[in-house]
Structures are given as structure tokens and as C-alpha cells.
Image (cartoon, grey):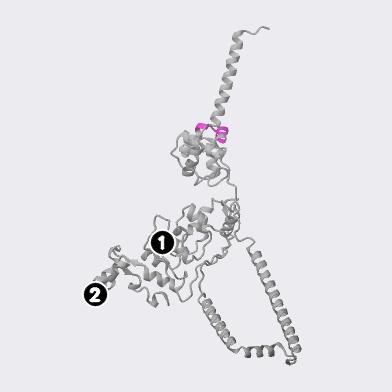
């Protein structure tokens, strides 16, 4: 059977077209995109509702192109991103299936086909970050301290044994020497009698030494008493390993978003679980602790991450209070934040570099802003321990107020108006060209004590 050249030519053309179509189809499925550009676009347009590799408010985006081609068409994918409502209303079966499963339409995005390709290129290349368990800097410290303490006790006991042995040997040698010299020595006497005889013999030195010891002990006792109520560098372990460095530092969350009563209440307030769940209803995994710590928040809220629903079985988080003041001390956050215009870091330090909260030391507070652009050379330099009475008084004495330029209707504007009616008092305040908090009554006992 002869095969014509025309037949072979047609078959070859058909094969070439088939290969070309397959290549074109494969290219469309895996359309080229810039993953680097796609990451930025994903964070801007998609990250609030989607994860690349797992379901969130919307489905995981990895494999989205293949799913659309298999169930609808690639063109509909682009249309869906730009206007999902129109695709649903057109009767597309897959679009209506997505709407039925997720219960909401996708927010329209102002992106081109090329930008969609960039986003999908990013999610296809996306690899979840490796969870690194932060090393506990204090690990092993307890055992090392216990071991060190035990060694010191053993050494002290050995030293006492050596001293006792030396004293006994000296006493024996002295007695032997006295017998050889024909000197009568007292009969057997206990150590108390021997000590009294020795102390009386050297009573002058014993008296001076005893006085020095008493004075040193009294001074040490007074210094220890001065530390009562001083909690600098106090950093208790919390039930959840929350990180201010991550939330306030890297993520840039404002302190007042979580401590939302600071502007209207005496207390700054511990954030409620509901505030945490605003984000952690969708964010289930941390960058350093995985799901372990966030699962505690879900448990407290009675939230089941697997079913994306609330169970109603809540469990309160027992946070440990860090900044403690005596019961007879009054402090009002709203007064200092609203009227005084203080930033949180003035008293709490740079929490963007901290994990769980701690009471900052005087050195920590003085170092805040030293290398920052907002550094204020006139800020108070503390010398007294944090949260002590001297610390508060120091701030009130050194903090100056520009009452002349205070906003109309503000507290300091009212004070300025009153002072202008008494020019003599006003001039006395302005002898050094400044008005301090102390001059406006900041040192009156009743301001801080009930």
C-alpha cells in the first residue's frame, strides 16, 4: 500500500499543530509570572482573606489556576478576580459552587491578567516558613545556680572544719609548750570559757570590731528595707508567650489598639480575648511557636480552628500583673496620656524590643530614643528606681509644660487663663521661663494619695 506525500505532509502538519497546541495549553496552565512582584501584590490585595497554602476566610490560592481550568476556564479566573459577582450572575457553575461553599463573594480587585499571573506564580512557589523554637536563654540556669550554691556550701563547711582543726592543733601545741616551760595552764575548760577569757584579754579590739559589725548590719538592713516595693526588671512568666517585639515592632500594631482603655480610664487595661481574636480567628500559626501559643487563645475564646466556629466553652486567661502600685497610690493613665501628652514609652520603655511585659529599669528608660529620630534632648533623665515615689516626683519636677500654646479648651489652656488673671503668680512661675508640673500642683500629696 503506497502512502502519498500529500498524506504524509498532512499528518506532519497535524502532529506539529497538536504539539504546538499542547505547548500552548501547558504554557497557559503555568503562565509565566514574576513571583517577586507577586509577593508584594499578594500582601496588598489577597493576604487579608487568603493564605497561599491553606484555607482562611477564602480558599488556599495554590492550585487555583488548575482548578478553574478544570472546572470552568482560565478566562473566567481572571474575570472572577476582577468581578466575582458578574461571573456568578453569568451562571458559571464553578463560580456558584465557590459562592455556595464560602458564603460570600470575592472582593473585586483592580489588577491586570499579568498581575494575576504574578500572584499565582508567587503562591505556587510559596514554601511555609520553618518554625524555629526560640531558645530559652534561661535554660539550665536554675540547675547551674543550684549546683553553684551547693559547691559554696561544701567549701564553707570544709573551711570551718579546717579552721576548727587548726584551732584545736594550736591549742594542743600551746598546752604542750606551756608544760615544757613549766607554766601552769588552766584545767580543762569548754570553748565558751576560753572565748570569754580571750575576749577579755583583747577587749579593746573586740569592742571596736563589734561596733563595726553592728553598724554594717544596720546599714545593710536599711538598704534592704529601701528595696521594699521596688520591682525594677520584674518580668513574670505569663500563661501565653506573647511577643510585643512581634506585634508592636514587626507588625506595627499601635499600643492603644490592644490597651484600648488607656485614653479614657484610670487603667490601660489588659486586652480582652475578643481583641486577640480579631486577628487570630484567621491567623492560627505563629512565626516562632507554631500553633502552640495561639491555640491557648482559641481555647480561651472557645473557638475551634478546624471548623471555624465557636463552641461556647471559654477558659479565661490568667495574666500576671506586671506594674503594681500600692493600694494607697492613685495613678490615672487617661490623665497622663490625654492631658500630659505622654507616649507609652516614657514609662514603659521601648516595648518594640520586648517579649512579655517587664518593669523597665531607670537605665532602660533613659536609653529610650537615644538613637531614634524622635529623640528629645530635654526629656527627663531618671535617677530613682522605676515605679517608686521618687521616680514620680522626679518626673513632675523636671517635666515642663508649654501652657501658652496649649490647645483651646484643654486643661493647660484653662490653667493659663487663670494664671493670666494673677500676673504676680504667673511671673513667679516664669522666673526660669518654664512652667513645670510641680509648679501646677504636681507635688501635692492629695494628687497621688487617697
Q: Secondary structure at mark 2?
A: helix
Q: Is residue 330 shown to the viewer in this render?
A: no
> 169 or 112: which is nearer to us?
169
> 283 or 315: which is nearer to us?
283
Residue 228 image point, x, y percent: 52, 75
Residue 166 image point, x, y percent: 71, 79
> Magenta span has 84?
no
Answer few, some or many: residues within 10 Å of disc 1's Cα (few below 14, many 20 plus, some between 14 and 19): few
> 170 or 188: which is nearer to us?
170
> Label 1 belongs to which residue?
343
Q: In this rendering, would 286 be left or right of 405?
A: right
Mark 1–mark 2 distance (CA, rounded to whole Å): 33 Å
Q: Residue at x 76, y 86 (%)?
A: 176
Residue 424 image point, x, y percent: 24, 75
Specify the segment rendered in magenta.
Answer: 67-75
Q: Residue at x 74, y 86 (%)?
A: 177
Q: Quadrant of the C terminus?
A: bottom left
Q: Quadrant of the N terminus?
A: top right
Against 186, is 388 above or below? above
Q: Within the image, what quadrant is residue 140 found in?
A: bottom right
Q: Residue at x 53, y 53 (%)?
A: 280
> Label 2 belongs to which residue?
424
In the rendered image, the residue lying farthest to the front is 181
> Magenta span has 74?
yes
Amino acid at each position: 500500500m503506497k502512502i502519498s506525500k500529500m498524506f504524509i505532509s498532512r499528518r506532519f502538519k497535524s502532529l506539529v499543530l497538536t504539539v504546538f497546541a499542547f505547548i500552548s495549553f501547558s504554557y497557559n496552565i503555568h503562565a509565566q509570572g514574576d513571583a517577586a512582584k507577586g509577593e508584594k501584590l499578594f500582601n496588598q490585595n489577597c493576604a487579608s482573606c487568603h493564605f497561599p497554602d491553606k484555607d482562611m476566610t477564602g480558599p488556599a490560592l495554590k492550585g487555583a489556576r488548575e482548578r478553574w481550568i478544570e472546572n470552568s476556564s482560565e478566562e473566567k479566573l481572571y474575570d472572577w478576580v476582577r468581578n466575582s459577582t458578574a461571573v456568578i450572575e453569568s451562571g458559571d457553575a464553578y463560580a456558584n459552587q465557590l459562592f455556595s461553599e464560602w458564603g460570600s463573594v470575592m472582593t473585586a480587585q483592580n489588577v491586570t491578567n499579568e498581575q494575576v499571573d504574578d500572584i499565582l506564580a508567587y503562591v505556587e512557589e510559596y514554601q511555609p516558613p520553618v518554625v524555629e523554637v526560640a531558645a530559652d536563654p534561661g535554660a539550665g540556669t536554675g540547675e547551674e545556680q543550684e549546683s553553684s550554691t551547693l559547691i559554696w556550701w561544701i567549701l564553707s563547711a570544709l573551711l570551718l572544719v579546717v579552721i576548727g582543726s587548726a584551732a584545736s592543733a594550736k591549742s594542743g601545741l600551746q598546752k604542750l609548750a606551756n608544760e615544757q616551760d613549766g607554766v601552769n595552764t588552766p584545767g580543762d575548760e569548754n570553748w565558751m570559757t576560753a572565748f570569754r577569757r580571750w575576749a577579755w584579754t583583747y577587749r579593746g579590739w573586740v569592742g571596736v570590731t563589734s561596733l563595726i559589725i553592728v553598724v554594717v548590719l544596720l546599714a545593710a538592713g536599711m538598704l534592704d528595707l529601701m528595696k521594699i516595693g521596688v520591682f525594677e526588671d520584674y518580668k513574670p512568666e505569663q500563661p501565653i508567650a506573647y511577643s510585643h517585639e512581634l506585634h508592636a515592632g514587626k507588625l506595627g500594631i499601635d499600643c492603644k489598639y490592644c490597651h484600648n482603655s488607656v485614653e479614657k480610664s484610670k487603667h490601660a487595661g489588659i486586652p480582652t480575648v475578643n481583641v486577640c481574636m480579631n486577628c487570630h480567628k484567621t491567623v492560627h500559626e505563629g512565626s516562632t511557636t507554631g500553633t502552640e501559643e495561639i491555640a491557648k487563645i482559641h481555647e480561651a475564646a472557645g473557638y475551634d480552628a478546624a471548623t471555624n466556629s465557636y463552641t461556647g466553652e471559654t477558659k479565661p486567661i490568667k495574666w500576671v500583673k506586671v506594674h503594681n502600685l500600692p493600694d494607697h497610690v492613685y495613678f490615672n493613665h487617661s490623665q497622663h496620656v490625654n492631658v500630659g501628652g505622654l507616649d507609652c514609652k516614657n514609662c514603659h520603655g521601648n516595648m518594640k524590643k520586648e517579649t512579655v511585659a517587664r518593669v523597665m529599669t531607670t537605665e532602660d528608660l533613659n536609653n529610650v530614643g537615644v538613637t531614634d529620630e524622635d529623640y528629645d534632648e530635654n526629656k527627663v533623665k531618671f535617677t530613682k528606681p522605676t515605679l517608686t515615689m521618687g521616680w514620680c516626683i522626679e518626673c513632675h519636677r523636671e517635666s515642663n509644660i508649654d501652657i501658652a500654646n496649649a490647645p483651646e479648651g484643654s486643661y493647660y489652656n484653662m490653667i493659663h487663663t487663670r494664671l493670666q488673671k494673677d500676673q504676680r503668680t504667673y511671673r513667679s512661675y516664669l522666673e526660669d521661663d518654664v512652667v513645670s508640673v510641680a509648679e501646677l500642683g504636681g507635688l501635692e500629696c492629695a494628687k497621688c494619695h487617697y
